[in-house]
Amino acid sequence: MNREELFHAVDHTLLTQQATWSEIQQICDDAIKYGAASVCIPPSYVAAVREYVGERMKVCTVIGFPNGYNTTATKVFETEDALENGADEIDMVINIGDLKDRRYDRILEEIRSIKSVCGDHILKVIIETCLLTEEEKIRMCQLVTKAGADFIKTSTGFSKAGATFEDITLFRGHVGPKVKIKAAGGIASFEDAERFIELGAQRLGTSRMVKLAKAEEEDGKKDIDQGSY
């Protein structure tokens, strides 16, 4: 896989609480430069980012983030607001307490409700794998498939761990044929990113790939400069 193909799978992400507008603008510029799949940013920036990038880049935002325990009505409103502000893609967090309590019907109905609002817009369902048992991960593969969501996503990046190769393999074996996979959180190298895709991920939630590419470019410039003396 070449770098261009890799970047086409990246949701270039900045979701930290202290993210400033200038930092958001920078990741938008970088996402466009490197040909990312989307820029994933906080809901409060969606309208401004839509105006800033126009149609040059897909805009992704998060719902019920990062804990997932908002009410379904709140998540539905957040989704409607995000779409009205110009979001193209939605990444929602499930209610993990409902999963632990085996309230599968509630989870199913919530995902369906949000997908109904999304319509043709892509919906990714974040299940926070680091907090789940294997049985719970498999159950979520089934529920995401049944609910008609577009992606199952490993992690928020705000809990105790992110994506693992084992989780992507597990997902691939249990989601339906129409459900895609997004690995997110802790993707530290181009080699790891390529491995996630080889295992079945179609999207990667990360800011690291662009940072690595920029660092390589900077090192290359230094080498050229040093060689000119």
Image (tube, rainbow, N blue to C red):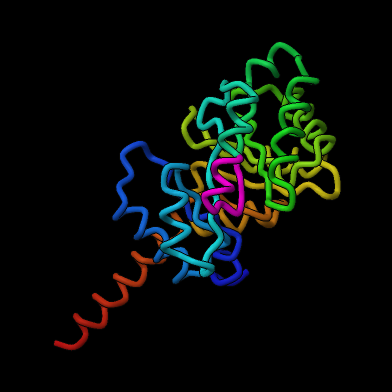
Q: Is residue 192 visible?
A: no
Q: Which region of the structure is painted magenta?
A: 80-91
Position of residue 73 measured from the top left corner of the image (x, y, whole percent): 63, 25
Q: Is residue 215 above or below residue 79?
A: below
Most extreme residue toward the top is 101
Q: Quadrant of the N terminus?
A: bottom right
Q: Is residue 43 above or below residue 39?
A: above
Q: Position of residue 12 (x, y in %)?
A: 48, 55
Q: Position of residue 168 (x, y in %)?
A: 69, 43
Front position in the image: 154 or 114: 114
Which residue appears at 32% of the width and 53% of the height? 23
Residue that appears at 27% across and 77% down: 221
Above or below 130: residue 20: below
Quarter-wise, where is residue 62 in the image? Answer: top right
Left or right: residue 222 compared with residue 114 = left
Count the marks.
Answer: 0
Residue at 64% x, 31% y is: 127
Q: Nearer the viewer, residue 133 or 45?
A: 45
Apparent side of residue 108 relative to residue 155 in the rendered image (left or right):
right
Give 80 or 94, whichever is nearer the viewer.
80
